[in-house]
Image: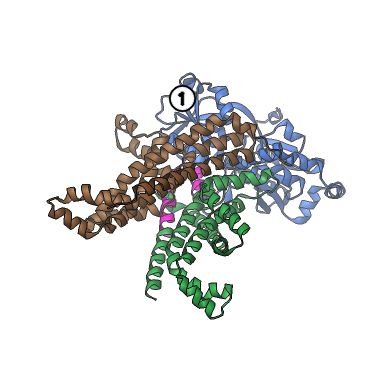
Chain colours: A blue, B brown, C green
Amino acid sequence: MLAGADRLRANRRRVLTQGLVIGGAAAVGSLPGRALAQETAEGRLKTVLDRGRVIVGTGSSTPPWHFEDEAGQLVGMDVEMGHILANGLFGDRDKVEFVQQAADARVPNLMTDKVDITIQFMSVTVDRARMVDFTLPYYREALTLLFVKDSPFTSLADVQGKGVKVAALQNVYIEDLVKEKIPDAEVLQFDSIANTILALESRRVDTTFADFSTAGWVTAQDPGKFKIAEETWGNHNYAAAVRPGDQRWINFVNEIFLSAMAGLDFAPFHDAYLKYLGIDVPLAPAGFPTQFL
Amino acid sequence: MYDLDWGVVLTHRDAFLSGLWLALRLAAWGLGFGSLIGLALAFARVSGSRPVSALAAAYVEALRNVPLLLLLFMIYFGLPIFAVKTFPPEIAGKLILDGSTSAIVGLALYAGAYLGEVFRGGILAVGHSYREAARSLGLTGWGVARYVTLPIMLRTVFPSLGNTFISLFKDTSLASAIAVPELTFATRELSSDTFRVIEAWAAGGALYLATSFAIALILRAMERRIRWSV
Amino acid sequence: MQVVWDNIGLLLIGLRSTLILSAVTVVSGSAVGLLGGVGLLFGPLPVRGLLRAYVDIVRGLPLLVLIFFIFYGLPAIGLDVRGFEAGALALSLFAGAHVSEIVRGGINAVPKGQIDAAKALGLTFWPRLAWVVFPQAAPSMLPPWINVVVEMVKGTSLVVLVSVNDLLFAATKVAERTANPMPLYLAAAALYFVVNFAISRSGAWLERRLSYG
């Protein structure tokens, strides 16, 4: 799922790709050979180590993934993964440069070597896997519903067949996505996540259709105001992506991620997961390496 | 190059036309209620009572200096939140206006601030002698306003009223941000559903243009007819 | 309201973008309007016709429609404009059309005798315009021009709908982080008010100065 205001740009990009076929996919086909040759000779890992910092492409306006805190600092789970990567590479979590990019620039910026890696709530899809190499996944996104705390509804089943009003972020496919689960819903589309939350808070809608991570974040900010539906659907993975064809680089990134998610560098990952996603991840138990399942 | 396909506009003409019709209705209601607010403000401004006049002036300044989009957000989202916090549920439920009503309230409040100044100018333009004459005929304060000041003033402010209606008609486009299915909403939906961006926006734009021109022509004709004969 | 104070720095950064966008729009719109107004009056027939079409079309369209048209339309014909550029272009075109009409009206209101006198003094077209017509037209053009400036500052709030990082977008971002939008919208409204109130007050002050001078 694309979240946040980035979705708007993504919609616009759809227009480009459908109308003109000059989107990300086309860019792959027309890549100059120069950059690629340099890659095979040296490898991205050496380039990054020589440079002394890793360049990470991410977004800037979607909590809990990448957003500005009160001080204007870029924080969030995606951003934390960037710091974890820097720590693995250099032993210094600050040797990372974040390039803020719109969601529709995620693949093109990899292909043109503007970034070493994209860590930006990227849903793993087979289509995308044709263009990029995905790292190990670090989150399972899903769709769910938000309710106000005192709502009589608590689950998807509660709102089916009642002709409820549903707020959702404006998107080409959103109407179908909602009606797939709530066929009799009246869908009200808004321009920002903020306004979908307001629609709920002002009782204009019975529920707001949201990504699981967004719903979790919103609820965590004010547990007295909102609650999340019991079920999720459309579950899928978020992973970072690199330019395809550099096995050494992706292996190394994966080792760093694995060490953070299930190994000796677990602590910062665990704390960030709790802080941004509200999930107290247990360290994978000793014995059989279950993290590979 | 981009191949134009105007067929999609024709197949979606119902959404366009109902969006246009809704926009016109929103603007008309906005003008109607806005005029009432404007009249109240204008009489408050010329009332001679300092606090009343200051209050009216503050209203005008506040409304004219804040973006309409934010005003719509406050009415559409803010009012119900306030109502739910303040009143028992039965009353709060009644205060949750639907999108179109919220848009009308916003447009009326907004237009009222502009019309208040227009009407004030209109009232001041009604010569002192008319009011003197009316008083000497035995009309009291309200009677002077109702039978002398208002009719004469309305003729002088008619062109401004017409222009305000056209502005309001264009301003209804903002109601799309609070999920009101007016013309901009319909255009945007067509544009994102079919990816026929140019066709959708050209058609939506043309409808706005043609309608504003048509309104302007009608108003000019009406202006000539009521041009004052006093 | 605590949420507003905690994030006032971010709101002010957003306000700065709004002011920059407004300034760009007002400057370029006024330049377009100055040329447009002169062209509407004195240009050769085809130029007059084109300018009339531009002014009437843009003035007949909602600003929001113009913004969407440019933001979504230009990429469709192969020009990849970003939100800021699309917003600035739409707002400038909008301001340009309105200022054109103001300039046309202002120049028209200058007594014909003044122009004849300047001709008699041997002044050619541009000096005549710059030294005789314009200074006399300026006082009558100022109030509507100030109105356009205020309308443009308010108009910039619409670019939030195409994800430009303006004041309203800054407020929206904080709102999404804190899941508490209403106080932030109120704060944004207050900031817009302060800016616009200051502009219209200084405009009124300038008006009084000019009318005495």
In the rendered image, the residue lying farthest to the bottom is C121
On the image, the x and y values in percent for residue B103 come to 41, 39
User: For mark 1, what is the residue?
Assistant: A164
Q: Nearer the viewer, residue B204 or A170?
A: B204
Q: Which residues are magenta?
A: C170-194
Q: Nearer the viewer, residue B53 or B225?
A: B225
Tag 1 secondary structure: loop
Which amino acid, by three-letter code, is at mark 1?
A: Val
On the image, the x and y values in percent for residue B2 come to 71, 40
Q: Which quadrant would residue B12 be assigned to in this image? A: top right
Mark 1 Cα shell of 10 Å, populated few (<14), some (14-19), many (≥20): some
Left or right of A174, for residue A123: right
- The correct choice, above or below, for B51 with respect to B197 in the image is below
- The correct choice, above or below, for C136 with respect to A40 in the image is below
- The correct choice, above or below, for C107 with respect to A214 in the image is below
Left or right of B153, for residue C47: right
Q: Nearer the viewer, residue B46 or C133?
A: C133
Residue B29 seen in render:
yes
Instruction: Identify the main secondary structure in magenta.
Output: helix
Left or right of A256, for residue B112: left
Quadrant location of the C terminus of chain C in the rendered image: bottom left
Which chain's residue wears label 1? A
On the image, the x and y values in percent for residue B84 come to 34, 35
On the image, the x and y values in percent for residue A60 come to 59, 47
Is residue B68 within the magenta segment? no
Please name the residue shown 27% across and 58% down the image.
B124
